[in-house]
Amino acid sequence: MLELADIFRQAGPAYRQAYQARMLPSHRTAMRDIEACRTAALGGHLRACDHCDARRYSYHSCRNRHCPKCHTDQTRRWLNRQRARLLPASYFLVTFTLPAELRALARSHQKVLYRLLMTSAARALLKLTADPRYLGARPGLLAVLHTWTRAMIYHPHVHILVTAGGWREGHGWVRSVHPNFLVPGWALSRIFRAKLRDAVRRAGLAHLAPPHAWQKNWVVHLQHAGTGEKVLDYLARYVFRIALVNSRLERFENGRVTFRYRDNKTRTIKHCTLEAAEFIARFLQHVLPNGFSKVRSYGLFSPSRKPQLEKARTELLASTPSSSSPVSPETDSSRHAHEAPRCPVCGIGLLRIIEILPRRRPPP
């Protein structure tokens, strides 16, 4: 199967040569790690079956958060932790989209603009949900930053999973006034626009933003999300990687890459063919700055609100019919992490480590 690493190994040297002065350190690191992932460059170990003596080499993963081959176990652990944190309540999914006029600014000042985008969206939600006409309480917010469309086009937006209720001191858990309605989208978009505008000004970047960007209507989408578990499943797919899996890559021929994606509007499968350099550039524009956290908690889910969160959980559980106990954060993710795998040749023995293979290059 064609892999992103194959494209990087073949077309990467020419790309680096052409753009070496403009490449960000995070882009260089991502390419280097993905090329080396699960190869002898990162070391590994040799296993032998204790029944038939079959041998299997296993090389280490690069663990870069943008690699399409890594993080299966880490994703599962994250998902289990978030499921365990979910309150037994209804949820809404709110999506805040950065206007096209501000995307160039975001691309050139990623660490600042991404942070401002996430915090402005969360503050807008907290401001409007504090209004007693809608909630009058502090909900829990889990925010995840995405920067892509299915075709990997640059499109920064924030998904926020928000409880359809919140904690109000002296009153306990308060449910949304309207079960199928959280806050008016038109009002939320205006508050979001104003908060991000003010934040950009405070950051000293207002002169780089087109003035008409603050005059147009901004897009904020709200939808009911049930118990929140399906939204968590969706978000978990992209917490530790970019929206491109190797299985979507179809061809790499004559210096051109073809991959498929599902169109959001028509729901049909489409194909995109790009020159290798353009494909690499389109992928790398979604590599996050070093140290940037794309998952953040606000409101009742903020670490500083843990006492109130536990009070809300206790109150909600007391008023909720008994159900199966929540999933432990490590259930199904680390239970068998250190067990030897079954031999695929004989199906009887276990593959035991008999040799550690050293790295062939320094760690990233």
Image: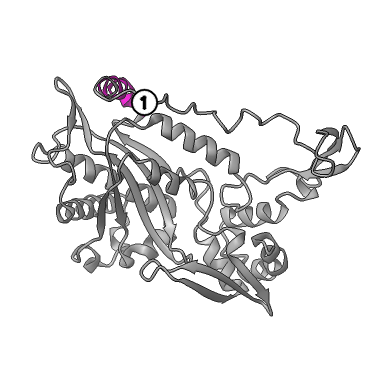
- Determine whether the residue tagged by mark 1 lies in a helix, strand or loop: loop
Expressed as whole percent of the image width and height from the top left, the position of residue 4 reads 64, 61
Q: Magenta stretch?
A: 303-315
Q: Is residue 178 left or right of residue 351?
A: left
Residue at 23 percent across and 44 percent down: it is: 125
Q: Is residue 141 left or right of residue 34?
A: left
Expressed as whole percent of the image width and height from the top left, the position of residue 177 reads 12, 38
Residue at 55 percent across and 61 percent down: it is: 284
Expressed as whole percent of the image width and height from the top left, the position of residue 228 reads 34, 41
- Between 345 and 105, the one lying in front of the other is 345
Query: Which residue in the rendered view is the most extreme toward the bottom?
Result: 254
Expressed as whole percent of the image width and height from the top left, the position of residue 316 reads 26, 24
- Between 292 and 157, the one lying in front of the other is 157
Is 314 in the magenta? Answer: yes
Is 308 in the magenta? Answer: yes
Name the image quarter holding the C terminus.
top right
Which residue lies under the disc numbered 1? 323
Q: Is residue 206 left or right of residue 323?
A: left
Residue 62 drawn above or below residue 13: above
Q: Tag 1: residue type?
A: Ser
Query: Which residue in the rendered view is the most extreme toward the right?
Result: 53
**Residue 333: quarter of image:** top right
Residue 230 drawn above or below residue 1: above
